Image (tube, coloured by chain):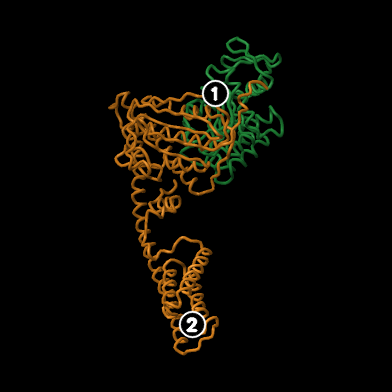
Amino acid sequence: MRPAPTTQNLYKIFTRFTLPLKSSKYPGLKLYQTRSYRPLSQYAISICLVLMVSLIAFAFNDLIGYKVVALVLLMTVSVIAMLFEIFPVLLAALLSALIWNFFFIPPIFTFHIERTEDVLMFLLYFVVALVNTVLSFKIRKEEKKAREKEEEVRQIAFYNTLLNSLSHELRTPISTIIGAVDVLREPGDKLSKEQSEELLLQIDTAGMRLNRQVENLLNMSRLESGILRPALDWCDTNELILSVLADFKLFSTHTIVFVPDDDLPLVKIDRGLIEQVIHNLVHNSVLYTPENSTVLIQSTIANESWRICVSDNGQGIPEKNIRSIFDKFYRVPNSKTGGSGLGLSIVKGFVEMHGGTIVAKNGESGLLIKVELKTEISFMNRLKNE
Amino acid sequence: MNKAEILIIDDEPQIRKLLEITLESNDFIVRTAENAKLGIQLAASHPPELILLDIGLPDKSGHEVLKELRLWYNKAIIILSVINSENDIVTALDNGATDYLTKPFRSAELMARIRSAIRRNQPSVNNSTTSCGDLTIDFSARLVTKNEVSVKLTNTEFNLLALFFKNEGRVLTHTFILKEIWGVGYQTETQYLRVFIGTLRKKIEDDHHSPKHLLTESGVGYRFI
């Protein structure tokens, strides 16, 4: 027997394929947060700012005097220190000190300083600018540490909810299987034929459900690993959709409508991935609409782009939740059990891997999901003869 | 009739037990091996009618075992694989596997595959005509009839259908079909294949949208039944 996966193991697995989390969900303090400019642009912006301020100060030099200019330049360095990393700021401090010396301290246009008072001021300027830089750097480092810690706490909470919901998803079918087997095993003929058939059916359904969840988890980890590349190959769209719909023949509770159009060209896509996309979309509609609902699949090709619409006549999704349905592990509040919140995020991942787009909206009745895939097309299938 | 022998090479005791019970209850004699070494030994000492071979074995990959077995063993080998591994399946088929099954599988499906594979162990009688359901093909006259009505096929369509008839019940990989029909150099021209499968279905199927003869094995190839 292999050892059962412990919670820590599961935690490791989940952290592996759920990182990185969207950082926008965890806004930290804005003030000292390093802006996300690339290092090179940080240098460029620092230099530009210092030059610009110097230029303006130079124009008004007669009015304000070179001592005030020093304060203005210091302020500029402080502003830069709040935004950028330490080295661009040091550069700004150095540059501004030199500029102040060269263009403002008399005699101007030389690095020579005559009066002792000015030498002292120049040194002071330098020290203040440096202290300023180092201090804001330190504050920012502390703040970053605090934010990381906060994020870690939040992530642990997030994984806990996630683990709870997933272990529930996996345990329900497992309990069904174990429980049903126990009842079937009981000695004597307490069960009617129908009852034992029903138990066997429950075991069967539970097994399929487990299989589906595992497949979703695998797909998600394949997606997150980043090693998955779509293997494009020519494909008959009708054949693909019909073969996916064949899996739903057992769902007698729902009517699934698809009218194949034999004039559609071949498309070049990853068949396995797109089968999964359509399967998950149809499954999602079947799972979350009441019995006797209709699921409609439409497939059209125009301008080298294959559009697949899956719509149903269920109750749709509350507008405030509709934007989140493609998020990983997201489940619409108060929705029926049976999902892991993975299906639609896998759909989105696979579609985007094809450079495609996906949108969900509430149609005239029920939910409408539109997938659009850019693809090469071939009308070779329209040739009637060799 | 002597009971046919089947060798199971799989490292999972639960799967071995399940297969053993399923096969024995269907009147087969079963031998099991939990690793590649033992499997190859057993196959040599008691050549079975069919081998069920798992791709993920502890001591050697199933692909290696398949290659070694194929050096001398020419009866059926069915590969057991997991889902999402079309590459594994195609490789195994191209290396001489008779068929494949993905875990989890239904026992009815397993039995059907096993029976069909064992049937094909017998050398086929070289009849010039043969039937499959409502379809009949006459290889020498290059004629195909459906419910005794002649079906008009182009040259390529006929060659394609003849290839399927000769390999009834077997999965043929895209590469294999393309090489057989269009020749070396065309192995990646799947466009042709899609088009001709499409037109062939229109001619031989009752409803070309839900084929009963020419089935698609997603990511792997086609199977004619």
Q: Is B199 rendered above or below residue A161?
A: above
| Residue identified by numbered label 2 | A105
Category of crowding for the residue at label 1, using alpha-carbon neighbours closer than 10 angstroms: few (below 14), some (14–19), many (at least 20)? few
Q: Classify mark 2: helix, strand or loop.
A: loop
| A115 displayed left or right of A313 | right
Label 1 and label 2: CA atoms lie apart by 83 Å
Q: Is B58 rendered above or below residue B158?
A: below
* Res B137 label: none
Tell me the subunit letter for badge 2: A
Q: Can I make out residue B16 in this image?
A: no
| Colour assignment, chain B | green
* Res A262 label: 1
Q: Nearer the viewer, residue B23 or A127?
A: A127
Task: Give, as a three-letter code, the residue at label 1.
Answer: Asp
Q: Nearer the viewer, residue B211 or A234?
A: A234
Q: Classify mark 1: helix, strand or loop.
A: loop
* Residue A194 placement (x, y as % from top left): 32, 24
Q: Earlier in the sequence, mark 1 or mark 2?
A: 2
Q: Nearer the viewer, mark 1 or mark 2?
A: 2
Q: Looking at this view, name the residue that lies furthest to the left.
A: A190
* Residue B57 placement (x, y as % from top left): 55, 43
| A167 displayed left or right of A277 | left
* Residue A122 placement (x, y as % from top left): 46, 83
Report which quarter residue A253 is drawn in: top left
Tell me the subunit letter for badge 1: A
Q: Nearer the viewer, residue A245 or B220?
A: A245
Quadrant location of the C terminus of chain B in the rendered image: top right
Query: Decide: marks 1, 2 in contact (CB < 8 A)?
Result: no
Quadrant location of the N terminus of chain B in the rendered image: top right
Both marks 1 and 2 on one chain:
yes
The chain letter of the orange chain reads: A
Category of crowding for the residue at label 2, using alpha-carbon neighbours closer than 10 angstroms: few (below 14), some (14–19), many (at least 20)? many
